[in-house]
Image: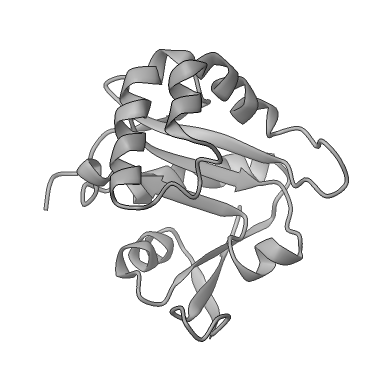
Amino acid sequence: MNPPMKIRLVPPAERYRESFLRGLREFQHEGLPWWFGGGLETAEQDFAAFVAKKLADSNRRDESFVPKTHLWAVTEEQFVGRLSIHHELNDALRVVGGHIGYDTVPSFRGRGVATEMLRQALPVARALGLTEALLTCDDTNPASIRVIERNGGSLRETKTIDPDKPPKRYYWITLS
């Protein structure tokens, strides 16, 4: 296991373009582009617009849109992970997703990045007005289970949503 990394959470910014695109390629290589919300080509062609959209996601667009704050984990000015905080829950997020979701760039896993991202994000969630945060993960994801539990997550239930997928775990973290 590698030593923990010193990271900080920052808003999306154009200066992280090259390391973000490298990280995104790693995610896509392992088949995890679901959080990106667009193709690699879009980010490559107009990264400024991509960043602007991520920043704008914190504002409500319409009644059905749940605002979310995007934060990027960086170390030595290099993108190593991403995290988003939904400002509230809708029915879909109560089932899958929760308030906070995160991903660590594959080549940086095992160094405490996700644990530290979540630790730093909890005061941000509190500042957004949340008093507790729901986090969900697959029952078969021991790394995410450890991240959530190390940050005070309390398992409330585990349930099967789709018989073809692993059961989901539902954790709550009280924000103080």
**Count of labels in the image:** 0
Q: Residue furthest left?
A: 1
At horizontal 67% and vertical 61% (from top left) the residue drawn is 93
Scheme of image coloration: one colour
| 126 on left or right of 138 | right
- Asked if 174 appears above or below 35 in the picture, the reply is below
Location of residue 63 in the rendering, given as x and y in whole percent from the top left corner: 88, 46
Q: Which quadrant of the structure image shows residue 8?
A: top left
Location of residue 152 in the rendering, given as x and y in whole percent from the top left corner: 46, 63
Location of residue 170 in the rendering, given as x and y in whole percent from the top left corner: 55, 73
| 84 on left or right of 53 | left
Q: Nearer the viewer, residue 159 or 23?
A: 23
Location of residue 95 in the rendering, given as x and y in whole percent from the top left corner: 64, 70
- Asked if 75 appears above or below 136 in the picture, the reply is above
Q: Nearer the viewer, residue 140 or 111?
A: 140
Q: Nearer the viewer, residue 54 or 176?
A: 54
Q: Which quadrant of the structure image shows residue 16?
A: top left
At horizontal 26% and vertical 21% (from top left) the residue drawn is 76
